Amino acid sequence: MARPCLTHGAKDLVEHDPVQVRIGEQIRRVNIEQPVLVFLLADAWHDVVVLKFVHTRFVLDRPDLTIYQRGQARVLETLVDGFHSWMNDPDDVLRAPRRLIDSVESTTQAYVELKASGIPEVEGWTSGDVLRLGRSRAVIDYIASFTDAQAIAAAALLSGNSDRHWNDGRSL
């Protein structure tokens, strides 16, 4: 049923004013020389609106999906709060998972280099800001590397609700 709606594709895009993006070793900022306007033809725009409605009504608004999403949000909150507090605990920080510690070191170093680069947007950063950003980015990247099962197991371990401490703790 959706196949006919999706056949328009790229031929319905009309591009005006090309974009020029400057990319260095790491993307630090995007330099847009000229504004870009992209228009859809009327039929394609209608298809997009219909697909957005169908997706919202029949996918996003389903209670069985909503309850699952709320559970995932709770797991993510537990993981972020748990690992963040672990990385800020001076007594236990060295007992954190090695991969997380290595990630904190590398992301913090990247933020140190970014601060030293002289970009005006980061001039006001303090060393505390750099450390906080490095830790936060490392925690988010670490959690993002988990499968759903690993995330659920780690959240249970961090909250003290796991009955499989030895088995689940190995995956960290």
Image: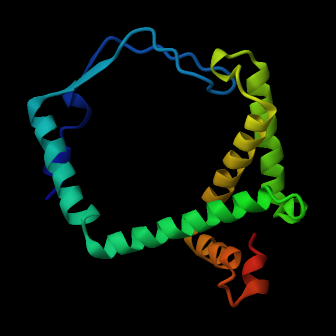
Left or right, 85 with reference to 152: right
Q: Is residue 16 left or right of residue 19?
A: left
User: Which residue is located at x 17 percent, y 57 percent?
Assistant: 54
Q: In which quarter of the view is residue 106 placed?
A: top right
153, above or below 13, in the image: below
Q: Position of residue 62 (x, y in %)?
A: 25, 70
Q: Is residue 95 above or below residue 51?
A: below
Q: Residue at x 79, y 55 (%)?
A: 88
When the figure is inspected, residue 86 is found, relative to residue 65, above or below; the finding is above
Residue 154 screen position, x and y as percent: 67, 73
Q: Which residue sits furthest bottom? A: 163
Compared across the picture, whether 10 is left or right of 125 comes to left
The quadrant of the rendering that contains the N terminus is bottom left
Q: Quadrant of residue 14?
A: top left
Residues 105 and 92: in front is: 92
Q: How many marks?
A: 0
What is the quadrant of residue 171 in the picture?
bottom right
Q: Quadrant of the C terminus?
A: bottom right
- Does 99 sit left or right of 154 as displayed? right
Q: Give percent across and percent down for residue 33.
A: 45, 9
Q: Residue at x 32, y 11 (%)?
A: 17
